[in-house]
Image (cartoon, rainbow, N blue to C red):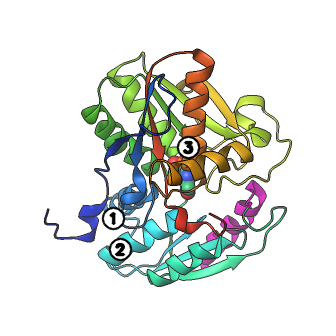
């Protein structure tokens, strides 16, 4: 298979039957988003945001691009900005794993690390990312940069509505349940909106950390958890409650066990949010005692996490 640009490696990820994970009831497919060049689901969002920014004249060739990132959006932007000829600065909380810094540096981006407010290494909270975002916005202002603003930028949802949703539908129109963890909410909102437009009976389920389940309970018992990139204890600005038929929560222990099982049993070395998604899919099958066909997202590689 011949490709002419790194950008051609973004989108069109495969769906894999996770045959070593289920107990015989139901079928779970993982969409292998980590196979993209930046190593995560955020590559398609980065590509869409930069294309849309050029098309709306918000961004010009050579202009600085800046974003607050947990690492994955930064890696996606680093890859995409290189192809478009824009320098990129990633502003990242120190709580995100050092492996993420290494990847960003290797991809040629400038990195600014920010202090944690109430999190700890490996556990980045909503307050930590708010602090980082304010610094990113300030730098964008000072240096006439384009601030990506993944939490408020509708191009993120558009990326998933125009690519993730159609890819899943075209590969597997017998899908009955879609399930995804929530950071900015772009993956869940865009994909769910597309799938429901094709078949309104498809159940869409959001996944949250048990003790920071703001969407399900409105409460945060503990903002710290291991599912980096998700569960920031705030309702994402573009959240659409009507798309979520249900919300399933998972504990750190469940997530860790499932993430390790995906590596050791299925041969997929993925990160914690992938484990969270698959654990929630199994919980759904157990709770409903059903044999439904489920699709969920395998978001990023395990090599981005210190202790995996
Ligand atoms: C590892 C990981 N999983 C899941 C997500 C959640 O994706 P979204 O922002 O589309 O809700 C992110 C977002 O950055 C992430 O980095």
Q: Nearer the viewer, mark 3 or mark 1?
A: 3
The residue furthest left is: 2
Residue drawn 31% across and 53% down?
Answer: 11
Residue drawn 63% across and 80% down?
Answer: 112
Q: Is residue 226 magenta?
A: no
- 35 relative to 63, above or below: above
The reply to whether the residue tagged 1 has its Cβ within 8 angstroms of ligand 1 is no
**What residue is disc 1 on?**
54
**What residue is disc 3 on?**
185
Specify the quadrant that holds the C terminus.
bottom right
- Where's residue 296, x and y in %? 47, 38
Please tell me the numbered disc located at residue 60: 2
Quarter holding residue 76: bottom left
SS of the residue at dot 3? loop
Residue drawn 24% across and 62% down?
Answer: 8
Between 23 and 186, the residue placed more toward the observer is 23
Q: Earlier in the sequence, mark 1 or mark 2?
A: 1
Between 136 and 8, the residue placed more toward the observer is 8
Specify the quadrant that holds the N terminus.
bottom left
Q: Earlier in the sequence, mark 3 or mark 2?
A: 2
The reply to whether the residue tagged 3 has its Cβ within 8 angstroms of ligand 1 is yes
Q: Mark 1 and 2 residues: CB-CB less than 8 Å, in contact?
A: yes
- Where's residue 212, x and y in %? 77, 42
Quarter holding residue 31: top left
Quarter holding residue 249: top right
Q: Which stretch did the figure color magenta?
A: 123-142
- Where's residue 18, x and y in %? 42, 39
Q: Label 1: how many residues lie within 10 Å, few (<14), some (14-19) or many (20+)?
A: some
């Amino acid at each position: 298979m011949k490709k002419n640009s790194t950008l051609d490696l973004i989108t069109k990820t495969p769906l894999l039957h996770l045959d070593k994970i289920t107990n015989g009831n139901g079928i779970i497919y993982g969409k292998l988003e980590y196979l993209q060049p930046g190593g995560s689901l955020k590559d398609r969002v980065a590509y869409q945001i930069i294309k849309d920014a050029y098309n709306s004249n918000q961004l010009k060739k050579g202009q600085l691009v800046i974003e607050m990132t947990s690492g994955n959006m930064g890696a996606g932007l680093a890859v995409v900005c290189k192809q478009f000829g824009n320098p990129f600065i990633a502003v990242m909380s120190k709580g995100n794993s050092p492996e993420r810094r290494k990847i960003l540096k290797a991809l040629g981006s400038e990195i600014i690390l920010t202090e944690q407010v109430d999190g700890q290494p490996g556990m980045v909270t909503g307050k930590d990312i708010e602090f980082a975002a304010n610094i990113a916005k300030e730098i964008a202002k000072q240096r006439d940069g384009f601030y990506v603003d993944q939490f408020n930028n509708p191009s993120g949802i558009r990326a998933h509505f125009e690519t993730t949703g159609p890819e899943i539908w075209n590969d597997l129109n017998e899908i009955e349940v879609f399930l995804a963890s929530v950071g900015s909410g772009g993956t869940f909102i865009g994909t769910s909106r597309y799938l429901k437009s094709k078949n309104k009976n498809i159940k869409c389920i959001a996944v949250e950390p048990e003790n920071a389940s703001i969407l399900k309970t409105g409460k945060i018992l503990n903002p710290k958890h291991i599912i980096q990139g998700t569960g920031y204890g705030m309702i994402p600005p573009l959240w659409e409650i009507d798309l979520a038929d249900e919300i399933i929560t998972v504990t750190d222990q469940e997530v860790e066990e499932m993430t390790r099982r995906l590596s050791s049993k299925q041969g997929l070395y993925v990160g914690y949010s992938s484990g969270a998604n698959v654990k929630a899919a199994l919980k759904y099958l157990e709770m409903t005692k059903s044999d439904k066909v489920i699709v969920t997202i395998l978001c990023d590689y395990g090599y981005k996490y210190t202790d995996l």
